Image: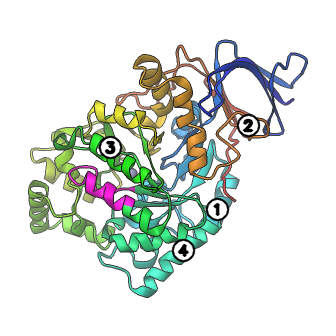
Amino acid sequence: MDLIIRDGLVVDGTGAPARRADVGIRDGRIDAIGDLAAATARETIHATGHVVSPGFIDTHTHGDVAAFLPDANDDLRTAELRQGVTTEVCGNCGFSPFPNGGKVADLMGSLFGANAHTWSDLAAYRAAITSARAYANLAPLVGHGSIRAAVLGFADRAPSADELRAMIRLGEDALAAGAAGISTGLVYAPGLYAKTDELIAIARALRGTGRPYVTHMRGETDMVADSVHEAIRIGREAGVPVHISHHKASGKDNWGRTAETLALIDAARADGVDVTVDVYPYTAGSTLLHSILPPWALADGIDAMVARLHDPAARDRIKRDFRDGLPGWQNQQRAAGWDGIVIASCAGRPELEGTRAADLGPDPADAVFDLIAEQRGEVTMIAHTMREDDVERVIAHPASMIGSDAIPLPGRPHPRLAGTFVRILGRYVRERKLLDLPAAVRKMTSVPAARFGLTDRGVIADGKVADVVVFDPATVIDRATYEQPLLTPAGVRAVIVNGHIAVRDEAVGLRPGVMLGG
Ligand SMILES: [Zn+2]
């Protein structure tokens, strides 16, 4: 064998109870499970008292270009790996770094790193990742926002018939090149300019692939139930599986409403629509600061947005919209309040990272407009908008998986980047007993593997790819906090990716990740 993990408690990802066994790995695959006392290996990990589970599959990240982060940001690029994530589903919320040179980076550039890394198509992106070498494996979705930006920029209008055909074609091309699904971000420009019929037409490209329509829905605040209805309708009419991203109920007025939305999802599932969700175990979200602006203020791209923010009349109109809302628009500023919005990453003004919007100036709205305009949108925020009982209800639901929504940018990123999976194991399994360990591991391994077509992964079984985590169930937990968001978790002994030891006793060595689906 190349590697034997001896005497661990194998939690195999299927939901079956733990059993004591050795696990042998050869040529990147699991070669034997059982008593391997007679076998020898080049390397051995002694795992007595430790759990040996499949590597975690993070269903929701924005780590598309983390492999291109400079060495100075090593803690950022390895944060997923250090908590046991061996595969990231990226390209979420409508944003992939392709196609067509990533015209979407005009307004959403900070998602693609300091140099706005983007590519003509998935094949070019795959080649770039292969030469840069990833930490964890990547399973990229193609973003509807990126497709829409490629065809009609940030225009606030419906596509013509020709434009719609061009968009569908880009979706089909990406799926043929191995994309794990199509994502939408219906609170972000340009995705928010799409009506439901456009989304159904795009989602039809998924028919016959088994891969899901993945959606950051139109609303997670007042419109959360309507938005679940829309997602289900898209799945039903397109005839494809639906995966709702980072499911939550945001804003005080909506706390408790995941009981209602999960009941809608249960009813749809009972009715034959294949709907699943993912969730991160925190009561704060994180996204681009300019996503608080109303749709009209984001139209036509970055220069148009900045020009509006310099116009006093437009500022007054945005402030009125914050106060009164607009039909069909999720008002995130109102859900969080200026007290609940904290600057996360701002490369141009790092001294502001960690500062509440309420403390940016005498009029927080003006201060935020100034900052967005000055930084040309390259600012992210953390928004405290949720309540713990909703978070726990979604984690415990049988249709949920775990997705960190990690945004690996320097500064004070959300601690979910470094903490999500170990927080599930430490806080929600060991301390709160919300789930038992085999059920939690299943949610983080075989269930997402099946959802995103990663048929070779997600279970410890003979012949499967050797993506494996070894952790101490008595001590595993997140250490990352809002103040110190990149602290290495406790209790992770080893992380093995494609048969290679990538993390051992907190030290990160190799970059063994590859892009899947090719
Ligand atoms: Zn999202």
- Report the disc number at residue 248: 3
Count of numbered tags: 4
Residue at (54% x, 74% y) in the render: 170
Of the numbered discs 3 and 2, the one sitting upstream in the chain is 3
Q: Nearer the viewer, residue 183 or 389?
A: 389
Of the numbered discs 3 and 4, the one sitting upstream in the chain is 4
Query: Taking 338 as reference, is 407 left or right?
Result: right
Q: Nearer the viewer, mark 3 or mark 2?
A: 3
Task: Rate crowding at label 4 as few (under 14), some (14 to 19) or many (20 or more) other CA atoms within 10 Å.
Answer: many
- Magenta-drawn segment: 216-232
The amino acid type of the residue labelled 1 equals Gly
Q: Secondary structure at mark 4?
A: helix
Residue at (48% x, 82% y) in the render: 165
Q: Secondary structure at mark 3?
A: loop
How far apart marks 3 and 4 lie (CA) works out to 30 Å
Image x and y of residue 235, in percent: 44, 62
- Report the disc number at residue 165: none
Q: Is residue 220 magenta?
A: yes
Of the numbered discs 3 and 1, the one sitting upstream in the chain is 1
Question: Is residue 186 in view?
Answer: no
Q: Nearer the viewer, mark 3 or mark 4?
A: 3
Return the residue at label 2.
466
- Report the disc number at residue 178: 1
User: Is 133 situated above or below 314?
Assistant: above
How far apart marks 2 and 4 lie (CA) works out to 33 Å
The amino acid type of the residue labelled 4 equals Leu
Q: Secondary structure at mark 1?
A: loop
Q: Secondary structure at mark 2?
A: loop
